[in-house]
Amino acid sequence: MTRPSPPADSWRLTGLERDPRGGGWFAVERSWRPPFDVRARVRRMDAQGALGPALVELKLPGLTDNFEGIAAETRGDNVRLYILSDDNANPAQKTLLLAFDVQ
């Protein structure tokens, strides 16, 4: 069964990183809805602050958690994004570092 996307107001911006190629930012957002719907996504933000579509979207039953940090570096013509979650000393959460290449 596919769950519908969370409502727009359930998403919270948790981190920003300047695009190393210039002209904008990468934003990491998370959503949590009881009883246990955890999601994260990365979107590009232009220089005026407008957010684009999701570049990366994580949701259950796949790997996701409480992502709060984001970093970016150039890799040739691409950008490698890193997103980070921490467990907050909570056994229901994990500390994760994930990497994604954006063309």
Image (cartoon, rainbow, N blue to C red):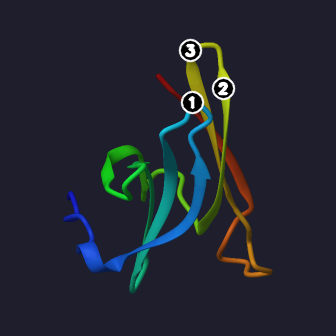
- CB within 8 Å, label 1 to label 2: yes
Looking at the rendering, which quadrant does residue 88 occupy?
Answer: bottom right
Q: Name the residue under label 1.
A: 21
Viewer-nearest of labels 1 and 2? 1
Q: Is mark 3 on a helix, strand or loop?
A: loop
Residue occupied by mark 3: 77
Q: Where is residue 58 in the image (x, y as percent from the top left)?
A: 44, 52
Q: Which of 35 and 67 is in front in this view?
A: 67
The residue where tag 2 is placed is 74
Taking the image as shown, residue 40 lies to the left or right of residue 10, namely right
Residue found 48% across the figure and 39% down from its top:
23
Say above or below: 74 vs 52.
above
Dot 2 falls on a residue whose secondary structure is strand
> Horizontal placement of 33 versus 96: left or right?
left
Please tell me in which quadrant of the rendered image residue 61 appears. bottom left
**Earlier sequence position, callout 3 versus callout 1:** 1
